Amino acid sequence: MDRWHYPRHKLCDYILQGMQQGLLERVTFFAPRKRGKTQFITRDVIPACDNIDVLPIYIDFWSDKDSPQNAFIDAVTTTLESRRNLFSKILAKLKFTPAVSSSGVTVKAEANATSAQRPTLHSVFDALNTHDTPILLLLDEVQHLATSADYASFTAALRSFMTARSDNKIKAIFTGSSQEGLNKLFKNTKAPFYDASQTIPFPQLDRDFVIHQLGVFKSVTGGRELDEETAFSIFTQQQFHPARFSEMLKYMALEGIYDIQVGFDEHDQRYLLNERSEFAKSIEQLNPLDKILLKLLAKDWNKGLYTDETKSVLESELGKRPSNPLIGAALTRLAEQDLIYNESRGVWLVADPSLKSFMSDN
């Protein structure tokens, strides 16, 4: 058990109870990277599923970026293999048979399977359909499905499997770190999962998280206490970034630093140097128009990106006045790099709060 993990019981109960009561079928939430989404799924949701007789299956679409379909198949078969004593009938559906090796019992595909190592997508769907308890698919980094037209067939099959049903057995939680990618999957009217999932907010952590982490720090340092008000002020300055705050406290405990302001100054100086170096490398690769538009958005420019006023600003920076198609193409490029996302018609926002702060200061 990771003592530093801060459980989000309220959010977990809201989702699972809503699903049990037939109020939720599929939910989607977004947060930038390292905001605790995966920890929430693996350390809160999965254990809770085990307590209510629901089979949770975690699929990370970044585990095989070249083939999200294979990522899905492998995650399902791995989960079933780990529970083979309970789900022997499902394993038979997948044409798997147990085999004994020097390391214990493993699972291998039969010779007549489509692949020597991997069952077909439809056999996996069929196996899940035959399972007699509810299944919760936990689909992480799902925005990856929107990055290539090559994934369209799998995406359509996955949607059909989950939505074209006469039962309520298969439910899902979609999570992602790219707001623009999720828009392409769920929000746009032509999106493959349009109207197929309910979006819920992934709450920003608050003072209770800070209190929990300070309690862990006290435990691992033999009773050393840190000032709560200063700690919460620092967490706010870190833009409510849980991993950043926790890593700072771990660094302090390891180095024997018991003044949180000193720990913050030392740890975050290195953290920000690394982060800003990465941002600078990314920005350096942008063309001039993209870079200026990103900077305007970081400074909350609200004049409309196609207005004469905006074009005058761009002209003063570029030496020539950009056309509407050029501005549109620049916004598309920025969105494809997950630097911005389209919140609503004509409204673009910087995707990462830390990047927004960096661009505002430079």
Image (spheres, grey):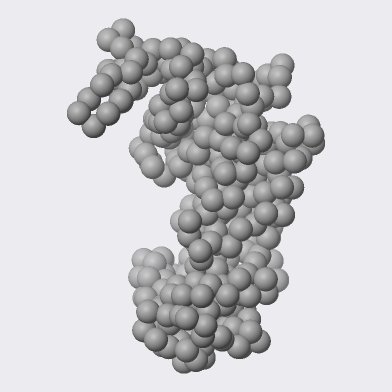
Quarter of the figure with residue 257 = bottom left
**Residue 116, horizontal then vertical, whole percent:** 27, 18
Quarter of the figure with residue 185 = top right
Q: Is residue 353 visible?
A: yes
Give the residue drawn at x 79%, y 34%: 21
**Residue 109, horizontal then vertical, whole percent:** 32, 17
- On screen, 13 above or below 235? above
Residue 288 placement, left or right of 361: left
- On screen, 294 above or below 335? below
Give the residue drawn at x 56%, y 39%: 138
Q: Residue furthest top?
A: 112
Q: Is residue 312 visible?
A: no
Q: Residue furthest left?
A: 102
Residue 124 placement, left or right of 18: left
Give the residue drawn at x 41%, y 44%: 62
The answer to which of 348 and 236 lies nearer the viewer is: 236
- On screen, 84 above or below 271? above
Residue 132 placement, left or right of 71: right
